[in-house]
Image: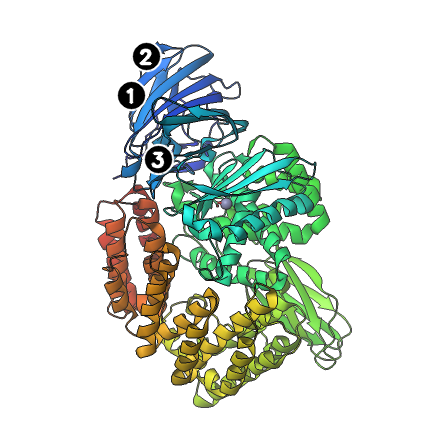
């Protein structure tokens, strides 16, 4: 179990962490309580005697009074599950230190001191994967947010910046490769069979960016010449057999480095950049200075083992972590309330990069789909929080889609309002002004105001207010004038019952219904509760295209007829708006069906309209297949649920499947023809071939509901003939949802073929847990007992249980069995890995938006969890979810 967070010192000593805890709830940290740390720590020297079972750590801090902070006669060094094995001040053994919870408090009388503290840690026993831990026989670290305090005692907060000198030593055979941040200054033989390495990182950094890796690793090595002509050595370190799967990561890294120079003017600042892939990792990857540590999932790929989606994931995450070198490392965060300062901005940067590397419209649609599928539900549920939260108990719970994805959208809106060029002036000013500092979101906004020339006064509300604004758009036609009436509502969220109107930048355009001509696109900033914009020159009511490019992260309720949506779905020149019109057409139909508002005539009419629209998409020779694949994708069950005040997951599932069956039958010949055409495109990683694989999968999915036998036959043939993972996985996905020998044979074949490749076996688990098969829940239960299943590896846990929790028809089993399984998982995983366990709470937290029967069952499981002895991570999520 976790050690409870240290309460404030009773004498009001200002030497607290990022923010002082709430006097009523000592475990609650508040943004407004920020105070600078009383001590500066300009230099840190560390010595590691490495071992899997036991690692001895010696840390020397050079400290000096912080002139910008209040005086303190002690220093508080945070610790978590460690004890001081010895304490020295200015080379004298100290005995007047004391512990306060996990923290070490040392009295200090002078203005500058050297503090040495020794600690001993047990990496193999560290199942939380925070701090120093063992993975596959190697040693690695994860320090963000508060993992460094599990290695040594330290003011573990992001506004304390230090340069680090690290000596690491250990048995050479076991740890032939010794890596740390910065540059390698010395290495050599040590005592007996030991060797050592000495690293120095010249750039001051907060402790959360510290990293160390030791193990049997091999590198894919390359180099990059920066814009000023400096040569940077690049290494991607992996286990021996994985080297052939590192090419894509290396290419992605070099592209990222070039792109950041060209688009943001950012140059890399060390002579060395290392990436290490580890198989046990709580998150995707980590941007430690000069030594990024990655989940193997975001490094390893080749066509036989990784899908096109995996390739994109690697490109995006490699870019993301690399971009952090400026947005996160050179300019870091003052405290964890500012997390979106680095994460939102860096997500935007990686999104823009990926847009430039591939199809910009498709990437935009994918990003919006993630936002609406994950962030919108978060923003409308009990865990809603602003992109700059006001309080937290456990910061790990705030690595959310809101901080990351909505944070990116907020900065994207600034870019939309400023235009690319002025936006760049804003970011240039931000980097120049705050280089080497721990900054705030407010600093970013001010740099944007000064550099980009925007007035962001009211815009700051995007940082303060949670909840997804809803915009209502109505078109009125009078004579030759078209009036667009816009109004907005920002829903109440926990702790924020009343909201103020936000500035919402909406790109809109009007189409002439007869000539199909489009008027000029306008950027309207809706900054009041209501606003009307008039457009002249329309003899007839035009068709409104709004929130083009998804210019604002809002929901739009528009009074558009079905004909208008069909019009836009067929001919809007904004790819996102076209996609959106089609989605809305389907959402309306399914919503009405679920709510019992469709008689058979209305149902037929709606189905025909959707069928016609999809048929047009299938036939449109101007579309590339990648975009066609996007347009064919039906809105997810979760997204449909989100549009309803209270959802019945079973009805949504049945209606969506039913519609797909109708469409699959209606367009059977077209889908078969599409599959045939796409199957003739030979494998390559170029856009055309990737698009072909995408539509091939879509065709199988429609046919699986429209004509299951035919789909099974086609899918099995595709499976057997596949020369790449994308085709093999999409075929297996369809087969896994169907009954028959093809299903069994393909699953056995897949397992045998990839046995021993953990990332592909993860897919094998995930495919079964996310399948459309009616017995999915039983399959998941059985898989939990499979010899390859373990709670110790987060990827494996997620591959089975996250996939299951995101599979509505299985998770929402009417008897509540799915909820019980997730609650059981949380209880079993929490003592092992609380960070990963707490991520399974949000699916249960949706109970308020689900029909009463299931809602009660979900709540029951949350209450069962609340009664258990939980980690701080999981306890916070459970209590917020019960709200
Ligand atoms: N900072 C990492 C990123 O987004 C995410 C992360 C957070 C990784 C916490 C590990 C632990 O790039
Ligand atoms: Zn990040």
Residue placed under numbered mark 3 in the picture: 174
Quarter-of-image position of residue 217: top left
SS type, badge 1:
loop
Quadrant location, the N terminus: top left
Q: Is residue 495 visible?
A: no
3D distance between C-alphas at marks 1 and 2: 12 Å
Marks 3 and 1, the one that precedes in the sequence: 1
Quarter-of-image position of residue 265: top right
Judged left or right of residue 306, residue 530 is right
- Compare residues 373 and 671 and report the one nearer the observer: 671
Foreground: disc 2 or disc 3? 3
Establish if 391 lies above or below 622.
above
Q: Is residue 676 visible?
A: yes
Rendered image: mark on residue 85: 1
Judged left or right of residue 620, residue 856 is left
Residue placed under numbered mark 2 in the picture: 94
Establish if 550 lies above or below 271.
below
SS type, badge 3:
loop
Q: Are marks 3 and 1 in contact (CB under 8 Å)?
A: no
């Amino acid at each position: 179990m976790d050690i409870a967070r240290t309460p404030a010192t009773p004498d009001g000593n200002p030497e607290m962490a990022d923010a002082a805890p709430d006097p009523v709830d000592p475990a609650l940290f508040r943004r407004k309580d920020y105070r600078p740390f009383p001590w500066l720590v300009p230099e840190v020297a560390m010595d590691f005697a490495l071992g899997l079972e036991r690692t001895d750590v010696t840390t020397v801090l050079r400290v000096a009074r912080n002139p910008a902070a209040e005086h303190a006669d002690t220093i508080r060094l945070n610790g978590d599950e460690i004890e001081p094995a010895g304490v020295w001040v200015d080379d004298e053994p100290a005995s007047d230190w004391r512990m306060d919870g996990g923290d070490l408090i040392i009295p200090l009388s002078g203005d500058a001191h050297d503090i040495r503290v020794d600690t001993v840690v047990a990496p193999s026993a560290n199942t939380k994967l925070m701090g120093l831990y063992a993975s596959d026989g190697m040693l690695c670290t994860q320090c963000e947010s508060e993992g460094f305090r599990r290695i040594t005692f330290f003011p573990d907060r992001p506004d304390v910046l230090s340069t680090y000198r690290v000596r690491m030593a250990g048995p050479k055979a076991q740890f032939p490769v010794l890596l740390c941040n910065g540059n390698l200054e010395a290495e050599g033989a040590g005592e007996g069979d030991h060797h050592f390495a000495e690293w120095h990182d010249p750039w001051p950094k907060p402790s959360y960016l510290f990293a160390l890796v030791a193990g049997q690793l091999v590198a894919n090595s390359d180099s990059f010449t920066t814009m000023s002509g400096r040569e940077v050595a690049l290494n991607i370190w992996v286990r021996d057999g994985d080297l052939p799967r590192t090419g894509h990561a290396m290419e992605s890294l070099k592209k990222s480095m070039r792109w950041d120079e060209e688009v943001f003017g950012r140059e890399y600042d060390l002579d060395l950049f290392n990436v290490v892939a580890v198989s046990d990792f709580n998150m995707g990857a980590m941007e430690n200075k000069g030594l990024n540590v990655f989940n193997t999932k975001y490094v390893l790929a080749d066509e036989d083992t990784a899908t096109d989606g995996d390739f994109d994931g690697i490109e995006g995450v490699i870019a993301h972590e690399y971009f952090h070198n400026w947005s996160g490392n050179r300019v870091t965060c003052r405290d964890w309330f500012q997390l979106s300062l680095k994460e939102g901005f860096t997500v935007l940067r990686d999104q823009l990069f990926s847009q430039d590397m591939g199809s910009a419209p498709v990437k935009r649609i994918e990003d919006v789909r993630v936002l609406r599928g994950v962030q919108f539900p978060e923003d409308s549920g009990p865990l809603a929080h602003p992109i700059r939260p006001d309080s937290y108990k456990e910061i790990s719970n705030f690595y959310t889609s809101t901080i990351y994805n909505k944070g990116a959208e907020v900065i994207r809106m600034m870019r939309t309002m400023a235009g690319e060029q002025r936006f760049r002036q804003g970011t240039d000013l931000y980097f120049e002004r705050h280089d080497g500092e721990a900054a705030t979101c407010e600093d970013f906004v001010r740099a944007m105001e000064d550099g980009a020339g925007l007035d962001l006064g009211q815009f700051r509300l995007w940082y303060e207010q949670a909840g997804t604004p809803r915009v209502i758009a109505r078109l009125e036609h009078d004579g030759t004038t078209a009036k667009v009436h816009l109004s907005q509502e920002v829903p109440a969220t926990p702790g924020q019952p009343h909201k103020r109107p936000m500035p919402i930048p909406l790109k809109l355009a009007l189409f002439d219904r007869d000539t199909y001509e489009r008027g000029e696109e306008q950027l309207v900033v809706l900054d009041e509760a209501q606003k009307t914009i008039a457009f002249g020159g329309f003899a007839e009511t035009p068709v409104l295209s709004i929130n083009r490019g998804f210019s604002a992260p809002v929901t739009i309720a528009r009074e558009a007829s079905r004909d208008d949506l069909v019009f836009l779905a067929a001919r809007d020149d904004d790819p996102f708006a076209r996609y959106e019109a089609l989605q809305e057409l389907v959402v309306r139909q399914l919503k009405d069906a679920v709510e019992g508002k469709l008689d058979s005539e209305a149902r037929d009419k709606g189905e025909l309209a959707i069928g016609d629209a999809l048929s047009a998409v299938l036939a449109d020779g101007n579309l590339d297949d990648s975009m066609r694949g996007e347009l064919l994708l039906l809105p997810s069950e979760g997204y449909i649920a989100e549009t309803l005040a209270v959802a019945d997951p079973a009805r949504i599932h049945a209606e969506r499947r039913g519609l797909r069956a109708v469409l699959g039958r209606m367009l059977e010949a077209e889908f078969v023809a599409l599959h045939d055409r796409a199957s003739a495109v030979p494998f390559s990683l170029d856009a055309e071939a990737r698009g072909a694989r995408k539509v091939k999968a879509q065709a199988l999915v429609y046919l699986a509901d429209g004509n299951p036998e035919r789909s099974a036959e086609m899918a099995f043939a595709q499976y057997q003939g596949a020369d790449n993972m994308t085709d093999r996985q999409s075929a297996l996905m369809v087969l896994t949802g169907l009954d028959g020998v093809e299903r069994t044979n393909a699953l056995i074949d897949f397992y045998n073929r990839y046995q021993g490749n953990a990332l592909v076996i993860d897919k094998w688990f995930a495919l079964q847990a996310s399948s459309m098969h009616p017995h999915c829940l039983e399959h998941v239960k059985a898989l939990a007992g499979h010899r390859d299943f373990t709670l110790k590896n987060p990827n494996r846990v997620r591959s089975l249980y996250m996939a299951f929790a995101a599979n509505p028809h299985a998770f929402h089993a009417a008897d509540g069995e799915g909820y019980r399984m997730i609650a059981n998982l949380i209880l079993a995983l929490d003592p092992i890995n609380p960070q990963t366990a707490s991520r399974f709470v949000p699916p249960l937290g949706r109970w308020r938006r689900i029909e009463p029967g299931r809602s009660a069952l979900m709540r029951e499981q949350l209450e069962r969890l609340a009664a258990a002895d939980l980690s701080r991570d999981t306890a916070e999520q459970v209590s917020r979810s019960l709200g």
